[in-house]
Image (cartoon, helix red, strand yellow):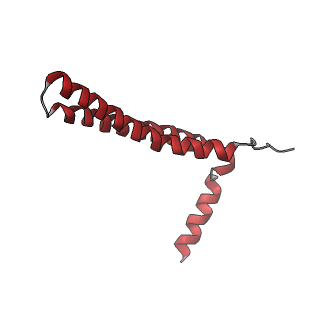
Amino acid sequence: MGKEEPKFKKLVNAADGLSLGISMVVAVLMGVGIGIGLQKLTGAWWTLWIGVFIGIGAAVSNVYKAYAKQKKSLDELAKDPRYTYKKEQQDKYDAEDDDE
């Protein structure tokens, strides 16, 4: 018997992708909230933009973390023997390309 896929694997993968979008929106909204709080605390209108930039920075950080996680997963997959090319096969294909 081969490996059985978990019953809810597609659902979990979809939720993981959706969570990235949600986390970006939440990060920006929290930043705006911080900015509004700073604006009320200090009375300076421009402090709102500090919060907005904090939120955008947090959203970019979330995207980078998701990218790093996905890259690590793909790198592990690339090391799987089922998906690696053998040196002899690659040389054979290179030789065929040279003949053309």
Q: Residue at x 61, y 44 (%)?
A: 13
* Picture coordinates of residue 2, whole percent (x, y): 82, 45
Q: Residue at x 35, y 32 (%)?
A: 30
The image quadrant that residue 9 belongs to is top right
Q: Residue at x 71, y 42 (%)?
A: 8
Q: Is residue 9 left or right of residue 23?
A: right
Pick the front one: 60 or 76: 60
Of the 4 image quadrants, the one containing the N terminus is top right
The image quadrant that residue 61 belongs to is top left
Pick the front one: 99 or 53: 53
The residue sitting at the top extreme is 41
* Picture coordinates of residue 93, whole percent (x, y): 60, 65
Pick the front one: 55 or 91: 55
Q: Residue at x 37, y 38 (%)?
A: 59
The residue sitting at the left extreme is 44
Task: Relative to 93, say whether 33 is above or below.
Answer: above
Q: Can residue 79 be seen in the rendering of this structure? A: no
Q: Is residue 55 left or right of residue 3?
A: left
The residue sitting at the right extreme is 1
* Picture coordinates of residue 90, whole percent (x, y): 60, 59
The residue sitting at the bottom extreme is 100
Task: Relative to 19, say whether 41 is above or below.
Answer: above
Q: Is residue 51 left or right of residue 100?
A: left
